[in-house]
């Protein structure tokens, strides 16, 4: 079909029989870096390698110079040929047409008469080397309209990364290499060693006493130095783990053995040597199979005597071998360093995890291994993770001092990585607490408090200076990064981001909800104390008053003084009611996010209109102040709390998702489906006494209090509790217009929150 207008082009691209988006791969083997896509159609495209060489400066007069760093290449196919190639499975033309089908709707006139559609590859050769599509419509009179200009805003796959194999002639002009999928190759080991050496010698932010060092930097109003030589790193003796695995090599066989040591049984000089040598810690998923080898009272003697690492699960075995390759003599692994048959030892060791991960030499993160038996030697990522899979284009490499000949360049979109480890709850704080991470994904990645790097690709060398922009990107593997990456944000924002990520993860034991973030909570609490402290000159540094009393209670940081801190934490919302549940057994008070399982939204409200007068908490373990609770309550005074029945005249709607657009009236989002049933029953049958507890919003108007865009909690009396004690069922948003206000005041009508203030307690 020959299209004569842009409207016909759009219909052709979006018709059912010509849908070009997300088609399954047609090759017998899906494209990968090792086996990229290549076909007759994209084989006709020949890239002149000279475009990647630095161009001479061009003088434009008045001391103005420039050089061309964005050359383009027109491909030979028109629209009909591109569609035919796409239907035959050509990934290059699928990419062209996918971008066109999205962007064509933004064209001002679809009635524009066209003669042809032209496709170009637009290259960027200055710094980041990649390419994007330029697609133009050429009118019958020769007028050109650019439909796609080098990519789409907010669509990462619309630009493709470019790399060349190490042994290919094109490698002389393309500096980036394909991902190194063998994480134990010589290149991978060298990469990890170089990153560790650079970080330990030059990254001041990644030092052991990161909190103290950061506070000193804040007090002195200075930034981390870009090129300094640090002293040798030594771990404080009190931060050494209770137990470690010592790595030994059996000379006769070349195999590795590990033996369990108890640090306090060593002499002070021996402990000091361990502190100087450092240790690695493993962050991994146990998986459904669990760990067949564990530290128990029965296995203690065997582990102390030493066992061959090949008898351990593959992930642990590989981690020990990698730590040994890095030159480390010790490693900490939870299954082998914590007594798995002792609740007391588990509770004690969990309270120390902040030190174990926060002061270790490096954390080895088994990101792609779903279980302990999978190992670190991951295969390439599934092709579905590439929106545009690796494809080959021919590249002519001229002389230019690099030799000539026919080369190949690989084009592919960035990976949409969702590694198994980011689905496990316990592993979140293991990365957040760490200073340095070696991440085992489809290749090795480095992530520390200062910078990111990848074994191959654009960031193949770890810089001495920070290479993030206000903490972004936190990591090259989403969901695996140190909390220090967020150092420019207030402590509560760090907490919101951490809890938001944690809420999307699963736990093997639902009662561990608070325990699994307890070490991270302790570090954030230290941040709160630090930010509330004075500078060396005695003046307040932070946004929070010096000495402000902030307590951690059941997952929330509470303050009697700072309502701007408390209210946003109370107003957490579920992302979707249908996807959330409450545990069968008590785990946290209803007002805590820890009382619900499911994705959450946090930190989206303003200063409250109430006052926090106190809170009570009974810990499960008195020695674990950030751990599980048996009960907790918060007391507030000066609360507006009309009944739900009183709000019916203002328009009440129960919604299922937090991200729906704002509408006038009362919009209620229940925490779980059973909560929604209780609220609905209160609306239709008036059986359940349900109330709207106002938290924040603009409630001040001359002469009366009328909320405009206020928010709060939906609550009901707590079963069997004392009077004025309530439990949470969900949240509400109340939107009123200025016209509503004028009508209400002119008619003297009673507004929703024209009710007496009262003191309440939430359970």
Image (cartoon, rainbow, N blue to C red):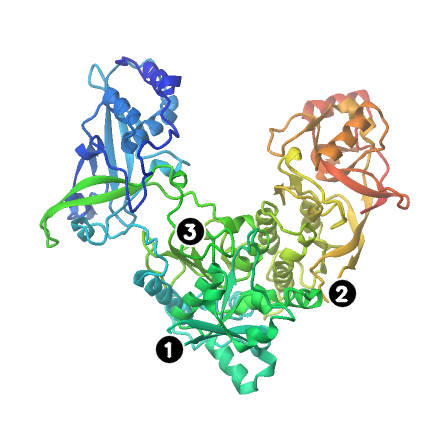
Q: Residues at badges 3 and 1 in contact (C-beta under 8 Å)?
A: no
Would residue 343 be found to the left or right of residue 121 on screen? Answer: right
**How far apart are labels 1 and 2 at the CA level?**
50 Å
**How far apart are labels 3 and 1 at the CA level?**
41 Å
Looking at the rendered structure, which numbered label has been put on residue 284? none
Of the numbered discs 3 and 1, the one sitting upstream in the chain is 1
Residue sitting nearer the eye, 390 or 723: 390
Residue 118 vertical position relative to residue 162 in the rendered view, above or below: above
The residue that appears at 71% across and 46% down in the rendered structure is: 595
Would residue 295 be found to the left or right of residue 175 on screen? Answer: right
The residue that appears at 21% across and 39% down in the rendered structure is: 393
Would residue 713 be found to the left or right of residue 243 on screen? Answer: right
Which residue is tagged 1? 252
Q: Residues at badges 1 and 2 in contact (C-beta under 8 Å)?
A: no
Which residue is tagged 2? 622
Say which element carries label 2: loop
Residue 416 locus on image (x, y percent): 42, 42
Which residue is tagged 3? 476
Residue 503 locus on image (x, y percent): 61, 46
**Tag in front: 3 or 1:** 1
Residue 743 locus on image (x, y percent): 75, 21
**How many neighbours does mark 2 have within 10 angstroms: few (below 14), some (14-19), or many (20 or more)?**
few
Residue 105 locus on image (x, y percent): 39, 22
Residue sitting nearer the eye, 590 or 372: 372
Residue sitting nearer the eye, 470 or 338: 338
Q: Is residue 211 visible?
A: no
Q: Residues at badges 3 and 2 in contact (C-beta under 8 Å)?
A: no
Say which element carries label 1: loop
Q: Is residue 501 visible?
A: yes
């Amino acid at each position: 079909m020959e299209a004569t207008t842009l409207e016909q082009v759009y219909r052709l691209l979006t018709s059912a029989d010509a849908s070009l988006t997300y088609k399954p791969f047609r090759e017998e083997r899906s494209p990968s870096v090792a086996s990229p896509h290549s076909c007759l159609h994209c084989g006709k495209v020949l890239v002149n390698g000279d475009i990647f060489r630095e161009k001479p400066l061009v003088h434009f007069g008045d001391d103005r110079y420039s050089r061309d760093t964005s050359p383009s290449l027109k491909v030979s196919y028109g629209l009909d040929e591109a569609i035919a190639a796409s239907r035959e499975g050509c990934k290059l033309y699928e990419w062209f047409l996918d971008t066109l089908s999205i962007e064509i709707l933004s064209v001002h006139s679809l009635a524009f008469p066209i003669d042809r559609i032209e496709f170009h590859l637009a290259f960027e050769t200055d710094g980041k080397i990649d390419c994007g599509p330029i697609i133009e419509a050429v009118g019958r009179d020769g007028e050109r309209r650019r439909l796609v200009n080098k990519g789409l805003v907010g669509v990462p796959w619309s630009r493709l990364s470019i790399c060349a194999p190490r042994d290919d002639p094109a490698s002389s002009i393309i500096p980036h290499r394909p991902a190194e999928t063998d994480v134990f190759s010589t290149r991978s080991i060298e990469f990890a060693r170089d990153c560790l050496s650079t970080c330990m010698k030059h990254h001041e932010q990644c030092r052991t006493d990161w909190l103290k060092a950061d506070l000193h930097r804040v007090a002195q109003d200075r930034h981390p130095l870009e090129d300094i030589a640090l002293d040798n790193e030594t771990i404080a003796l009190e931060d050494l783990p209770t137990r470690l695995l010592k790595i030994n090599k059996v000379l006769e066989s070349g195999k590795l053995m590990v033996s369990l040591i108890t640090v306090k049984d060593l002499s002070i000089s021996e402990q000091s040597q361990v502190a100087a040598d450092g240790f690695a810690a493993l962050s991994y998923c146990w998986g459904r199979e669990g760990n067949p080898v564990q530290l128990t009272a029965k296995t203690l003697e065997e582990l102390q005597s030493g066992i061959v690492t090949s008898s351990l699960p593959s992930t642990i075995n590989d981690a020990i071998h990698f730590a040994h390759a890095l030159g480390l003599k010790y490693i900490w692994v939870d299954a082998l360093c914590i007594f798995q048959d002792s609740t007391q030892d588990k509770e004690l060791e969990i309270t120390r995890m902040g030190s174990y991960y926060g002061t270790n030499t490096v954390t080895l993160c088994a990101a792609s291994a779903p279980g302990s038996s999978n190992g670190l030697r991951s295969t390439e990522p599934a092709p579905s993770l590439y929106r545009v899979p690796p494809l080959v284009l021919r590249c002519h490499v001229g002389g230019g001092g690099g030799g000539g000949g026919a080369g190949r360049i690989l084009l592919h979109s960035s990976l949409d990585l969702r590694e198994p480890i980011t689905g496990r709850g316990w592993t979140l704080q293991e990365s957040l607490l760490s200073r340095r991470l070696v991440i085992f994904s489809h290749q090795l990645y480095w992530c520390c408090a200062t910078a990111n790097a990848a074994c191959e690709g654009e960031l193949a060398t770890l810089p001495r200076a920070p290479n993030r922009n206000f903490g972004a990107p936190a990591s090259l593997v989403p969901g695996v990064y140190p909390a220090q990456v967020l150092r420019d944000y207030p402590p509560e924002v760090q907490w919101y981001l951490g809890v938001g990520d944690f809420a999307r993860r699963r736990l093997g034991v639902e009662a561990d909800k608070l325990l699994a973030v307890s070490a991270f909570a302790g570090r954030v609490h230290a941040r709160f104390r630090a930010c509330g402290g004075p500078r060396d000159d005695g003046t307040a540094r932070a946004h929070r008053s010096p000495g402000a009393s902030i307590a951690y209670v059941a997952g929330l940081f509470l303050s009697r003084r700072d309502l701007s801190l408390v209210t946003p934490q109370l107003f957490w919302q579920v992302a979707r009611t249908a996807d959330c549940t409450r545990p069968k057994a008590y785990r946290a008070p209803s007002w805590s996010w820890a009382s619900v399982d499911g994705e959450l939204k946090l930190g989206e409200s303003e200063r409250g209109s109430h006052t926090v007068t106190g809170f009570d908490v009974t810990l499960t373990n008195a020695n674990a102040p950030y751990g599980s609770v048996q009960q907790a309550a918060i007391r507030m005074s000066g609360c507006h709390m009309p009944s739900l029945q009183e709000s019916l005249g203002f328009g009440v709607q129960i919604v299922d998702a937090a991200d729906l657009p704002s509408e006038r009236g009362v919009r209620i989002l229940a925490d779980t489906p059973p909560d929604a049933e209780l609220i609905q029953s209160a609306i239709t049958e008036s059986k359940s006494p349900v109330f709207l507890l106002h938290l924040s919003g603009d409630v001040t108007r001359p002469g009366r209090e009328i909320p405009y865009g206020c928010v709060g909690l939906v609550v009901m009396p707590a079963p069997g509790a004392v009077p004025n004690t309530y439990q949470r069922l969900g949240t509400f948003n109340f939107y009123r217009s200025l016209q509503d206000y004028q009508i209400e005041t002119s008619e003297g009508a009673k507004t929703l929150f024209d009710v007496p203030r009262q003191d309440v307690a939430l359970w």
